[in-house]
Amino acid sequence: MILPIYLYGHPVLTSPALEVDLTDPILPGLIQDMFETMYAASGVGLAAPQIGRPMKLFVMDASGFDEKRFAHEKRVFVNPIILQEEGEPWPFNEGCLSIPDVRGDVLRKPRVQVEWTDQDGKRQLQWFDDMPARIIQHEYDHLLGKLFVGYLSPLRRQMVQRRLQSIQKGSTNAAYPVCAASPPGGRPKR
Ligand code: NI
C-alpha cells in the first residue's frame, strides 16, 4: 500500500523517533508499505517519520541511484546506530521526498559504520561508503528529527525559504500522495 508522505512543517519530521519493538506485528507490513511508497515516489530512501510514524526505522534501495554499482544495497534498518563516520566531507546536491522540489548541497563524511537490526531480526554491523553511506546519513538524520535543509548555507537557505513556506501550506506538485502540515483548507489532508 502506498502511504502519503508527510511534508516539511509537520511536527513528526522534527521529533526524535522512538525505539522499534521488534515483536510489533505491524512491522513486516509497514516495511513492505515503506518500500512501495518509496518506489512510487522514485526515492532511494524513506524513513518512518516521513510516513507519520516516529519509529527508528528506514528503508533504502541505492540501486535507484546506480543500478549496477549498488544492486545489492536494498536494505531495512531497524533501530540503527551510526557508530563512526570518517573521511573528508564531500558535497552532494541532496533532496528529500518530504521537501519536494528543494535541493541543496550538503557536506557529509564518505564512510559510516552502522549497527542495526535487519528485516530478519538479526543485529548487523557494517561499514558503508559512497552513496549508500550518504543515504544512511540522510535517513538517520530523519530519525533524529533533522532535515537536510538544516545544513544549507544561510544564502541557499534564504533562496529556498519561500518554497519551504508553500510546502508547509500544502502547495506542491509532488507526483505522489502527501500529507501537508497546514493546508489552506484547515485540516491536514491524508
Ligand atoms: Ni529525506
Image (cartoon, helix red, strand yellow):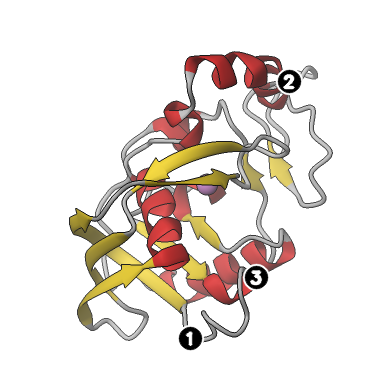
Q: Measured from the top left, where is residue 114 in percent x and y?
A: 23, 66
Q: Measured from the top left, where is residue 74 in percent x and y?
A: 49, 78
Real-space CA distance between mark 2 and mark 3, rounded to the nearest whole angstrom: 27 Å
Q: In the rendered image, is residue 52 in sight?
A: no
Mark 1 or 3, nearer chain start: 3
Q: Amino acid at mark 2?
A: Ser
Circle 2 is placed at which residue position?
Answer: 166
Q: Amino acid at mark 1?
A: His
**Quarter of the figure that contains the N terminus:** bottom right
Q: Secondary structure at mark 1?
A: loop
Q: Measured from the top left, where is residue 110 in percent x and y?
A: 34, 58
Around disc 1, counting alpha carbons within 10 Å, would you say few (fewer than 14), some (14 to 19), or many (20 or more)?
A: few
Mark 1 vs mark 2: give the one in front: 1
Q: Residue furthest front?
A: 88
Q: Nearer the viewer, residue 40 or 188?
A: 40
Real-space CA distance between mark 1 and mark 3, rounded to the nearest whole angstrom: 18 Å
Circle 3 is placed at which residue position?
Answer: 36
Real-space CA distance between mark 1 and mark 2, rounded to the nearest whole angstrom: 37 Å
| The quadrant where residue 183 appears | top right
Decide: is 51 above or below 57: above
Q: Measured from the top left, where is residue 161 in percent x and y?
A: 63, 16
Circle 1 is placed at which residue position?
Answer: 72
Q: Nearer the viewer, residue 189 or 77?
A: 77
Residue occupying image coordinates x 54% and y 85%:
71
Residue occupying image coordinates x 40% and y 41%:
107
Q: Amino acid at mark 3?
A: Glu
| The quadrant where residue 20 appears | bottom left
Q: Secondary structure at mark 2?
A: helix
